[in-house]
Amino acid sequence: MGVTTETDLTNAGQVTALFDRAAHAMRSSPYRKGSIVQLPATGRLLVTGDLHDNPEHLGKIVQLARLDAFADHHVVLHEIIHSERLVNGVDLSHRMLARVAELIVAHPQQVHVVLANHELAQMTGQGVSKGAGNSVELFNAGLQYVFSGDWEAVSKSIKGFIRAMPLALRSESGLLCAHSLPGPRSMAQFDPGVLMRELADTDYEPRTGSAYLMVWGRGHTPEQIDKLAEGWGVNLFCLGHQHVEAGLAVHGERVVVLNSDHEAAAVLSVDLAHLPSTEEAAWAAIRLRGVPLGQ
């Protein structure tokens, strides 16, 4: 069930080459501007929330996006790795990341992956947990389990793939999709101009870097959201990084938060020429449990 891959996911050479190709595709995309993907105000975007190694839901998302049928259809993905569901005591979510890398290689102008805190933690080696232990260590153990002595080469390519991820996706119509936004107490340290420039090593630094602050932030206030919206020209924020029991939640007039990994998982299909209000978004949410997975 889910998305199949043509790459031999037990072959270190094939896997490293795949992540290298996908990283190049993200960096060289004609939509890449600074550290964001900038889409026109046309076409459709399927907006998703945290996935956390749920390949069945990824398969349903790919079906809904209809990338092969329409060149102006897009999908945004984030928080792909790390799960509390282990295999033989290790985390094998690199397989999910490889499936996403194949999607990027196949549809480089339609599949957009934005940086999330779990991917950043894996890249930097900073500990984080989904409930089963240190997710970074469990992920590395999974690489060692599959690739033995070649695991560090695979890990290096994965880190390069993560480093190539943009911070956000923005449309000319005023939609911004990101894993999160900086917390209110971090705004004094946060550089709002980070979206308009390439990311530097310092942007990934824990508790001080602007990329770090953006993917880890919670507790946003209406005043903060309004300030960011005005500075970035945003009418609607679509975020993750929060547990949303119903799959989609509305926070005020500008923010929609999604989860795409659990039983009530939801996604949102957005017409980029006519953005919905948050109330309209709540009504338009697509529940993944109601989507049959094709063979």
Image (cartoon, rainbow, N blue to C red):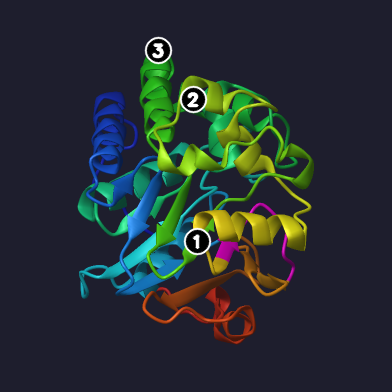
Q: Is residue 243 magenta?
A: yes
Quick check: marks 2 and 1 in contact, CB under 8 Å?
no
Judging depth in this view, the residue of 284 and 150 nearest the camera is 284
Residue 138 image point, x, y percent: 61, 29
Quick check: marks 3 and 2 in contact, CB under 8 Å?
no
Mark 3 secondary-structure assignment: helix
Disc 3 and disc 2: Cα gap in Å? 9 Å
Tell me if 39 is positioned left or right of 72 in this view: right
Q: Which residue is mark 1?
A: 233
Q: Main secondary structure of the magenta part?
A: loop
Disc 2 crowd rating (10 Å Cα; few below 14, some 14-19, many 20+) is some
Judging depth in this view, the residue of 77 and 292 nearest the camera is 77
Q: Earlier in the sequence, mark 1 or mark 3?
A: 3
| Start-end of magenta stretch | 237-245
- Name the quadrant containing residue 137: top right
Marker disc for residue 145? 2
Disc 1 and disc 3: Cα gap in Å? 48 Å
Q: Residue at x 42, y 82 (%)?
A: 274
Mark 1 secondary-structure assignment: loop
Q: Is residue 16 above or below residue 113?
A: above
Does residue 38 appear in the picture of this structure? yes
Residue 145 image point, x, y percent: 49, 25
Q: Which quadrant of the rendered structure holds the C terminus?
A: bottom left
Residue 155 image point, x, y percent: 43, 23
- Name the quadrant containing residue 277: bottom right
